[in-house]
Amino acid sequence: GAVVSQHPSRVICKSGTSVKIECRSLDFQATTMFWYRQFPKQSLMLMATSNEGSKATYEQGVEKDKFLINHASLTLSTLTVTSAHPEDSSFYICSARGQKLNTEAFFGQGTRLTVV
Amino acid sequence: QKEVEQDPGPLSVPEGAIVSLNCTYSNSAFQYFMWYRQYSRKGPELLMYTYSSGNKEDGRFTAQVDKSSKYISLFIRDSQPSDSATYLCAMSANSGYALNFGKGTSLLVTP
């Protein structure tokens, strides 16, 4: 299957700082990328959908000014958690889908964010 | 009611057993059905992808979709300890939409 690389895999940051997570499609062009958040023993919850070159669409309850998403190229999307707080600690996962891949969405390895 | 329901388990089976994992859903518009395997602290890995109703087999894995009952299943034959993971069902109404996930079922295959 296609490869999606997510970086970093783990990050610890101080409360009030910002953290950037990168999601790259390595062997295909990702026209759409999805960002999910997963709390322990919970399912993946969609945060936002981004299409290359346009603004992301955020799910209800997700603050767009807090979770900044950039999808400037067909192979890279970034999620920046601004002014992080301990309640933002979670597992963040991106997935990417290309035009030729139909509905199959390939996932990154995930980023474990801990805010202290 | 959540759109996708999945028993979180945990489910413990001996090595070699046949495992049956299931999800129910409420949105009759769902047409695309997937099963993902997720190891601890890793991203989900696509196992099976099915469109509409029917069966699909891939090695030891068989996916079944019954749209009339809004019920999907994943069967694992000759289960191995390496199959121990969380299995997530996911579905969408349109190929361009984001996926709706179940909570995931934690599976433990004991030697």
Image (cartoon, coloured by chain):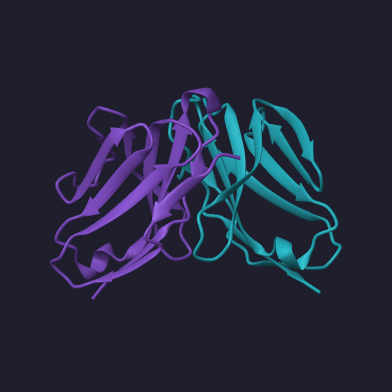
Chain colours: A purple, B cyan
**What residue do we see at 60% from left, 56% from top?**
B7
Q: Visible in this render: residue A105?
A: yes
Examine the rendered structure and indicate whether residue B26 appears above or below residue B79.
above
| Residue with the most extreme front position | A27
Drawn side of residue A116 relative to residue B2, left or right: left
Q: Visible in this render: residue A102?
A: no
Drawn side of residue B6 relative to residue B13, left or right: left
Q: How many marks?
A: 0
Return the x and y of residue B88 as percentages of the image width and height: 58, 50
**What residue do we see at 67% from left, 27% from top?**
B68
Examine the rendered structure and indicate whether residue B42 appears above or below residue B56.
below
Q: Nearer the viewer, residue A60 or B97?
A: B97
Return the x and y of residue A110 as percentages of the image width and height: 43, 56
Return the x and y of residue A83 as percentages of the image width and height: 14, 61
Examine the rendered structure and indicate whether residue A42 appears above or below residue A101.
below
Q: Nearer the viewer, residue A74 or B50?
A: A74
Q: Quadrant of the C terminus of chain B?
A: bottom right
Drawn side of residue A114 relative to residue B9, left or right: left
Q: Quadrant of the N terminus of chain B?
A: top left
Instruction: Kindly indicate the quadrant of the structure image that contains residue B54.
Output: top right
**What residue do we see at 83% from left, 53% from top?**
B77
**What residue do we see at 80% from left, 60% from top?**
B79
